Image (cartoon, grey):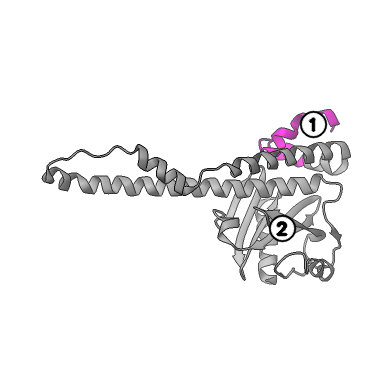
């Protein structure tokens, strides 16, 4: 793939708008072309900076409640019989609105978490140094994190599987440190993120399978930790690596 063609598709790739085949081809190109990889990394950093700035000025729940209260139309006095007839209707409407608002808000938070993880995955693969500890040996990678993150974790034995451990690095989600491990499946890279399972950092990330941009994602909680597996492989391959990680935990 020519570099000019690659650059023309980078924005669509980072936004998850490329077809699966084109996304996989461009991902392979980024691993071989330092110029395009640097360009992709720069764009990811800009996206993360814009996202961080947007969250900085996000109104708090208390502010939204005060605004809603100030603009609410005060009900006029009606006959007691009318109130008794319509009160259940208004109650149901309020509950339905509250549930819809909560689900919409949680969905937005989940998309934000998954989008940031997808950016971390692309950014690492586009970097000249995707991992800080390079080793296929889990007994080398796991101890490297001691003193760098506030928790420990177990890694699976991969002998006899199609997965290979490439290495790891320290990463951050909502300014909280965690482990970023990179595994290889044939010619594809898969990111595994591990954080302490704290509501304020991983809020909205419901356990299970999902899609983030052009990547398949799986996440679950185990032993007080939250695991995320992100990659451009199939959902079955994501689940296979997830099972190895769960069994090791």
Where is residue 9 shown, x and y percent of the image? 75, 32
Q: Is residue 46 above or below residue 120?
A: above
| Res. 17 image quadrant | top right
CA–CA distance between discs 2 and 1?
27 Å
Residue stretch in magenta: 1-26
Q: Is residue 180 above or below residue 25?
A: below
Q: Which residue sits at x=35%, y=47%?
A: 96
| Res. 238 image quadrant | bottom right
Where is residue 31 shown, x and y percent of the image? 84, 44
Q: Nearer the viewer, residue 199 or 63?
A: 63
Residue marked by disc 1: 7
Q: Is residue 12 found left or right of 204 in the rendered image?
A: right
Residue marked by disc 2: 192
- Are the residues flagged by discs 2 and 1 in contact, CB closer than 8 Å? no
Q: Which residue sits at x=66%, y=61%?
A: 195
> How many labels sit on residues?
2
Q: Is residue 64 found left or right of 110 in the rendered image?
A: left
């Amino acid at each position: 793939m020519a570099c000019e063609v690659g650059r023309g598709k980078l924005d669509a790739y980072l936004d998850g708008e490329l077809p699966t085949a084109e996304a996989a081809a461009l991902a392979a190109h980024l691993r071989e072309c330092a110029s395009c990889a640097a360009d992709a990394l720069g764009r990811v950093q800009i996206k993360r900076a814009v996202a961080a700035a947007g969250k900085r000025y996000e109104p708090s729940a208390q502010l939204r409640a005060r605004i809603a209260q100030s603009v609410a139309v005060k009900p006029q006095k009606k006959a007691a019989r009318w109130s008794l007839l319509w009160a259940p209707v208004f109650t149901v409407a309020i509950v339905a609105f509250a549930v819809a608002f909560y689900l919409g808000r949680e969905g937005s938070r989940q998309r934000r978490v998954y989008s940031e993880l997808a950016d971390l995955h692309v950014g690492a693969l586009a970097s000249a140094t995707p991992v800080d500890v390079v080793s296929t040996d889990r007994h080398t990678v796991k101890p490297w994190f001691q003193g760098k993150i506030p928790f420990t974790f177990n890694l699976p034995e991969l002998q006899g599987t199609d997965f290979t451990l490439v290495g790891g690095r320290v990463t951050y989600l909502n300014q909280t440190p965690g482990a970023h491990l990179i595994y290889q499946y044939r010619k594809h890279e898969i990111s595994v993120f591990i954080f302490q399972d704290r509501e304020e950092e991983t809020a909205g990330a419901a356990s299970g399978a999902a899609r983030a941009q052009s990547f398949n994602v799986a996440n679950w909680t185990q032993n007080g930790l939250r695991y995320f597996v992100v990659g451009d492989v199939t959902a079955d391959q994501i689940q296979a690596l997830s099972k190895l990680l769960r069994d090791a935990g």
